[in-house]
Amino acid sequence: MTPGSAAEQRKGLIFGIAAYGMWGLFPLYWPLLKPASAIEILANRMVWSLAVVAFLLTLRRNWAWTAEVRRSPRKLLLLAAAAIVVSVNWGVYIWGVNQHEVVETSLGYFINPLVTVMFGVVILRERLRPTQWLAVAIGGAAIVELVIGYGHVPWIALTLAASFGSYGLFKKLVGVPAVESMAVETAFQFLPALAYLSFLQTSHTAAFGHVHWTVTTLLALAGVVTAVPLICFTAAANRLPLSTMGLLQFLAPVLQLSCGVFIAHETVPNSEWAGFAIVWIALALLTYDSFAQARSRRHAVPSAPVDASPPPAASPAFTVTEADPPALRSAATRQSPPRLAAAAPGAGTPPLPRVDVETTT
C-alpha cells in the first residue's frame, strides 16, 4: 500500500489520535508516581527514555547517523539547547500536574501554536498573512485577560508554551529525525539525571526501590511512556497531511483540560473560561488560514496533460564524433538542434518542502 492512499491515511489517523490521546492523558499518569517528587520523576524519565531509544535504534541497527552529528558542532549545540528547554518543559509540566494545576498546563499547550508563529516571525523572519496577525493579536489579548482574571501572570502556561515553542524551533533548525534527535537529547540529560538519582539513593530519600513496587515500576516505565507517543506521532506524520496533523494537535490540550475539570475537579472561574474562549478563537483563525492556504496551493498547481505518444525519432543529416573538427561539430548542431525532452507532469512546479512536526509533553 502506497503512502497517501486511503488505507494509509486511516492508519495515520489512528496513530495520530493515539499519540495526542496519550499526551492528553498524561495528567492521569504523573500523580500515580507519588510520593516521588517532580524532580525525581523528571530524572527517571530522562534516564529510562535514553534506555528505550537506544534499544529502538539497536533493533533498527541505525547508528550511522551519529558520525554526521559528531562532525557538526552546530547540530550538537542545537540538540543540547533542545535538551535544556525540553527538560524545563517536562519538569514544569510534571510539577504543575502534581500541584493540581492541570487546567493551567493545558492552557500552555493551547497557547503554544501562537508562540510558534511568533518565533517564526521574530527569529526565522517569516512573513505573516493578515489572518495570522489577527490570530496573534487575539492570542495576546487572551493572555492579558487571563492575567487580569488570575490576578497574577500564568507562569506555568507561559513557561510551557515558551519552552515547547523553543524546542520546536531548535528541532526545526537541526534537521535530525525524531528518534535519533531524542537519543542525543536524552544523552545530554543522562549524566545529570543519573547523578541526581544516585544522590537520592545514597541519602535514602529516593522513592525508586523504596516505596511500593507499583511506584518503582511506573517510574521505570516513564521512558516507555515518553517514547511510545513519539513513535505513534512519527508514524502519523509520515501518512497524514500537515493540515490534519495541525488539527489533531489540539486533542492533547482538550483532553488535559477535561482531566483537570472532570477528574481532578479543579475549579475554573468564569474569567478563565473567557480567556480560554479567546484563545480558541485565535486558534480557529489559524486553522482556517492554514486550510485556505492549502486549498489555494492545490488550485494553483494544475495537472499537466500526459502525452502518451512516443517522441518522433531524430533524423540527423550526418553523424559527428568528438574526434571531428570543432567547425564540423558546430555545423551539425545548427542543422540538427537538440530535441527538448517532454517534461513530466508537474515538473514545472518545485515540490513543496517537507515539514516535520514534532511534539512532546
Image (spheres, grey):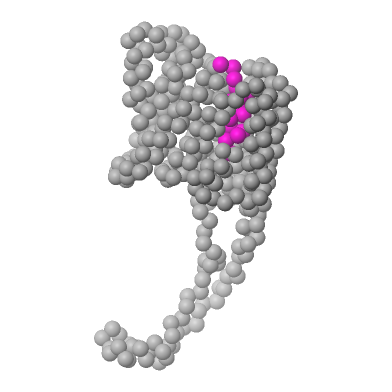
Q: Is the magenta stretch mostly helix, strand or loop?
A: helix
Q: Which of 354/319 is in front? A: 354
Residue 286 point in image, percent of width and height: 65, 44
Residue placed furthest toward the right: 270
Q: Residue 318, located in which quarter of the rendered image?
A: bottom left
Is 293 inside the magenta-drawn segment? Answer: no
Q: In this view, does 105 lie above or below 132?
A: above
Q: Magenta residues? A: 99-113
Give the x, y percent position of residue 278: 70, 34
Q: Residue at x 41, y 25 (%)?
A: 46
Residue sitting at 46 percent across and 44 percent down? 172
Along the viewing direction, whichever of 346 and 297 lies nearer the viewer: 297
Q: Is residue 64 visible?
A: no
Taking the image as drawn, is residue 184 in sight? yes
Above/below status of 250 relative to 265: below
Residue closer to the observer: 33 or 116: 116
- State the image quarter where residue 328 is shown: bottom left
Query: Which residue is depicted at the point 67% across and 48% down?
Result: 131
Vertical order, 24 against 330 (above or below) = above
Asked whether, in this view, residue 285 is left or right of residue 206, the answer is right
Please state the horizontal and vertical placement of residue 203, each as a whole percent of the image: 35, 8
Measured as percent of width and height from the top left, residue 42 is found at: 44, 22
Report the side of 39 relative to 28 (left or right): left
Image label count: 0
Magenta stretch holds residue 105: yes
Residue at horizontal 49 percent and vertical 15 percent from the top: 33
